[in-house]
Amino acid sequence: MKFVVFKKETLLFFLAIGVVLFSLSAWFMLKAGDTTVFNQEGKGIREIHMVTAEFSTKMKNGKEMEAYRWDPGTVFLEKGEKVRLVISGINGEEHPFYIEGTKIKGKVKKGEETVVPLQFEKEGTYRLICKIHSDRSKNGPMIAYIVVD
Ligand SMILES: [Cu+2]
């Protein structure tokens, strides 16, 4: 039978390699954690989450008032940036919407998520308008501003 004999130096060499590999992987894992928490660049398409909300109140005379809103009411995009706008329907049965100056339209239903892919090649402020709550007289204004610069 033949034994494989390591010299002390050889063992130390492999130990050193092991320590270096372990440190490198630990460093990469910690760095990856930082990326997830602080920086979404390179993670693909950015997501912006929005909800449909309702304000309501009862006046002293018993009359009720309400207003539907997109929340947040303003979102910011870079020109050419790809974004997934994810809208959750919380208040109101449904909100058919369009984005002024584009062909983008859709509908947000209560309890459902509507995903709107966005990418604007022209700077400006685009209005996301709910067709049935478009101004104060229709329990709005349910308008969100998409600022592209
Ligand atoms: Cu609406």
Image (cartoon, rainbow, N blue to C red):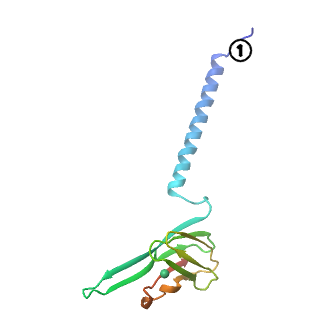
Q: Is residue 129 left or right of residue 14?
A: left
Q: Residue at x 61, y 30 (%)?
A: 18
Asked if 24 appears above or below 59 in the picture, the reply is above
Quadrant in the picture for the N terminus: top right
Label 1 CB-ligand 1 distance < 8 A: no
Above or below, 62 against 7 in this view is below
Residue furthest out toward the top: 1
Q: Quadrant of the C terminus?
A: bottom right
Circle 1 Cα neighbour tier, 10 Å, few/some/many (<14 / 14–19 / ≥20): few
Q: Position of residue 37 (x, y in %)?
A: 50, 55
Helix, strand or loop under label 1: loop
Give how far across and how far down residue 22 sits, in percent: 58, 35
- Where is residue 8, by image quadrant? top right
Q: Which residue is label 1 attached to? A: 4
Residue at screen point 54% across, 75% down: 108
Q: Nearer the viewer, residue 59 or 10?
A: 59
Q: Is residue 34 visible?
A: yes
Q: Residue furthest bottom?
A: 137
Quarter where residue 55 is shown: bottom left
46 horizontally vs 144: left or right: right
Residue 109 % position (x, y): 52, 74
16 versus 83 height, above or below: above
Q: Return the x and y of residue 105 as percentages of the image width and height.
A: 60, 80
User: Who's the residue at 69% across and 14% down the image?
Assistant: 5
Location of residue 77 by image quarter: bottom right
Residue most extreme to the left:
60
Instruction: Using the image as rendered, state which of residue 110 and residue 118 is in the foreground.
Output: 110
Residue furthest out toward the right: 1
Residue at the spot x=47%, y=82% of the render? Answer: 142
Is residue 143 in view? no
Of the pair 141 and 133, the residue shown nearer to us:
133
For the residue marked with disc 1, what is the amino acid? Val
